[in-house]
Amino acid sequence: MGRADCIAAVAWQDKFRHWADKSAHRPTYYLNEGNHEHRIHTALDLDNTLVGALSYGDLQFDKYWDRVCWYSGATPGVLTLPGTGIIASHYFTQGNYHDHKIARRADGQFIQALVAGCTISDKRNKDGKLLAYHSWAGAANESWWRGICYLTNLDGKGGYDLSCIRLSSLRKMFACNKGEG
């Protein structure tokens, strides 16, 4: 992760937070540090000539997030969201999957695993090719869901109702809020 990546991350955070920060019901923002962000620590540890040229402060997490859960060594931190029974981490299983799983424990309690690890554009060119196509991911680009996940009716034991809103729907909603739609 270099300076251009940090600039892009800050620009994304500005866009992501713009409407919610103006709301009368501002949410609390939690961030689980991911492996990409953690690479800054790794790079600085491996090459002290980068100190001063690149820093974790360039991501401005203290400006955008109310609480940050950091990696511990090579392991992502685990964050318990207060009063919800929900635990969060950059990943819990082997790999970094981008999907939703529901299971039932032996005691009857449902366990929901929501992994929403991608923030990526859904826009396509005139030939239908994704503009935000990552060659390293190959066909997986098409399997990534593009949108936000919104949790309501949290029961304090980790249960919730899940609403998923596509980016195309968000664009329409926000265009209406700006008087453009």
Image: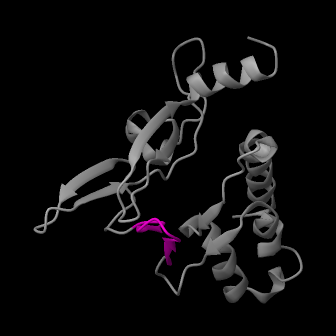
Residue at the image point whose x is 41% and y is 64% from the top: 156
Magenta part of the chain: 77-91
The quadrant in which the N terminus is found is: bottom right
Depicted 149 relative to depicted 67: above or below:
above
Of residue 55 and residue 157, the one placed in the foreground of this image is 157
x and y percentages locating residue 177 in the rendered image: 76, 22
The quadrant in which the C terminus is found is: top right
x and y percentages locating residue 71 in the rendered image: 55, 79
Residue 97 is drawn in which quadrant? bottom left
Is residue 145 in view from this perspective? no
Residue at the image point whose x is 51% and y is 16% from the top: 128
Residue at the image point whose x is 76% and y is 39% from the top: 19
Is residue 51 in view from this perspective? yes
Q: Is residue 76 magenta?
A: no
Compared across the picture, whether 23 is left or right of 160 comes to right
x and y percentages locating residue 64 in the rendered image: 77, 60
Depicted 10 relative to depicted 177: above or below:
below
Q: Is residue 87 magenta?
A: yes
Residue at the image point whose x is 81% and y is 42% from the top: 22
